[in-house]
Amino acid sequence: MLGAAGFAAQGQSGAEIPKRRLGRTGLEVSALGIGGYHLGSAASDTEATQIVNEALDAGVNFFDNAWEYHSGLSEERLGRALKGKRDRAVVMTKVCTHGRDKNVAMRQLEESLTRLQTDHLDVWQIHEVIYENDPELIFAPNGAAEALLEAKQQGKVRFLGFTGHKDPSIHLKMLSHSFPFDSVQMPLNCLDATFRSFETKVLPEVNRRGIAALGMKSLGGSGELVREGAVVVIMGLRYAMSLPVAVTISGIDSIEVLHQNLEVARGFQPFSAAEMQTIRDACRLAASDGHLELFKTTKKYDGDLGREMHGFPSSAELPV
Amino acid sequence: MPDTNGAPIPLREFGRHDVKISAIGFGGHHLGDAPDERTAVRLVRQAVDGGITFFDNCWEYHRGKTEDWMGAGLKGVRDRVFLMTKVCTHGRDKALALRMLDESLHRFRTDHLDLWQIHGVCFDNDPDLFIRKGGAAEALEQAKKEGKVRFVGFTGHKDPSIHLKMLATGFPFDSVQMPLNAFDANFHSFEQQVLPELNRRGIAALGMKPICGHGTPVQKGVLTGEEALRYAMSLPVTTTITGIDKPEVLQQALKVAQGFEPLQPSAMQALRDRCRQYAADGRFELYKLSLQFDNPEARLAHGFPLDTQQVEVREMIRMGDNSGHPYPPTK
């Protein structure tokens, strides 16, 4: 396992968590963001609230979510925790049309706003663009792309984006449509660097266009990279945060995990180019068949709603 | 015998070799779904009598049961068929491959295979692991030299790019097996990307999954089993391997295959067009997009999670049970 020995020291306790520009939006976001899915997995509402509040106080201001996470629980928890503090946060959630039309999207937006207890989102993204015909469906007449523009016009959302975890080619297909995306979310970790790589194929293009890059799955989605011995947590997280991204969204389901990740983020200093290369090289073999990036190679991370809309077996019928 | 048209099943050239095999092949995995050995033996005999000469199998199917049952069915008629099985190294070494070969031969009750293929070349690094020093490529060469196998090849169902990477190793394959059906034609297409290359090189092309493995598009009413089979068999392949687990399925296959005439290009195009909207997200080709068709040997060798619903995994778990009874069951 790749440990931290021999690498420059990580952040300093007590120092600030760095802020970065969110593309050309004019917003500044913390280099570490709180993933919404895991907020729904936290043991209790109280712990979820505690995670959000401690994160805010530590200088984390980016909060991720999605309409479909835990059937709404993730959005509800974030909404409750941010009550009275909404203005301190950059709130993003995702719309889950999975190929369906604008009306479905607008209805979901209203539900998200209600659950999040706010009148606007900072970023609204199309969730889980992972099926090869998704771009086509999203940009079809009366598709989800039209909903994004309409919501922006209505002032209900400030900025627009999309996300997906499957294949760089699908992201590039989305980007080939001349649509004013403000953000693009993608898996970025030290194994992705050498396997169906978003880092090499999508990230440079997003940066070239001034679109904010949002990294996710820094440890494989559920800590696979760590459990299977590819890297230690802090190395995996530091690698992802050292890439040219606006924010690295990290799934945090307990206070312990929050504390661990805050330690990495405080006073964060990116790895040098040489250190990054050393890490990529050390992970190359583990990356080469995709068994630790199951979101790319299996159905494990593909949500049930998307499967249903695309006529695929459910996660109960086809778990991995 | 069967209610079929009685015309012979066409025989086709096996690649660049002076050998001919039936245009339809008997898929080994489904044989293990037959209720018992007696039924399986009868199915195999009826297939041979119906004119099928190509028999597919694999070391890991049903943890050896299908090789065993097929061997029993071929007793006395071994010389009338072209027998293929696959080796499940999945990146592991030559010695393991040769041990699996001996086990396969033993189960088949034969001293040689007509064709031995590398099974499940499905992960991006499989070609590198295959061709490495001490890898399975060396086992294929040695087995051929020792006369235990006549021809060698590989198979996989995941992505045309992995097949092309295997071909790029320069290893002298005699055959290559791949999914070919009217959905594949428009999605990560082996038909478009791999098949022409094989034909150009004189490598025997073996089609599989003519109805997408479990027949889902037939159940959903997109096309009939017969249409699906006709489409696959009309492509420039040596044979189309189809899974056979019961007499009705065998009868349907024989009915299509006996006196088979390929579809006209316009009919092929019509089928492709009908399937196009479903091909767009790959919903009927789960072998390309999920691990559903990846057997435990492949998953274990590569460190992917197992699926406890898979028959091979259930068999492996049973092997570990202390039931008080011997395993495998004694006859």
Image (cartoon, rainbow, N blue to C red):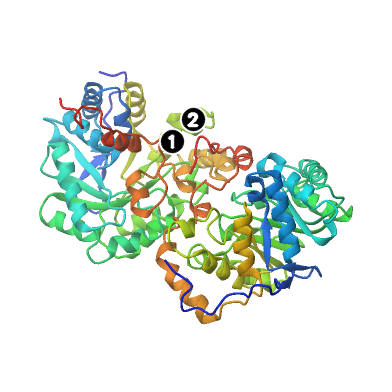
Answer whether residue A134 is visible to the viewer in this image: yes
Density class for disc 2 (Cα within 10 Å; few <14, some 14-19, many ≥20) is: some
Residue A265 appears left or right of A219: right
Quadrant of the rendering where the N terminus of chain A is positioned: bottom left
Q: State the image coordinates of residue A242 (x, y, percent, origin top left).
A: 60, 73
* Type of amino acid at the residue the image marks with label 2: Val
Q: State the image coordinates of residue A258 (x, y, percent, origin top left).
A: 63, 59
Q: State the separation of the CA atoms marked 1 and 2.
A: 7 Å
Label 1 chain ID = B
Q: State the image coordinates of residue A112 (x, y, percent, origin top left).
A: 78, 45
Q: Which residue is mark 2?
A: B218
- Residue A189 - label: none
Q: Which residue is mark 1?
A: B211
For the point 79% across and 44% down, the residue is: A115
The answer as to whether the residues below labels 1 and 2 share one chain is: yes
1 and 2 marks in contact (CB < 8 Å):
yes
Is the residue A201 above or below the residue B209 in the image? below
* Type of amino acid at the residue the image marks with label 1: Ile
Residue B257 appears left or right of A112: left
Residue in front for this viewpoint, A38 or A128? A38
For the point 60% across and 76% down, the residue is: A270
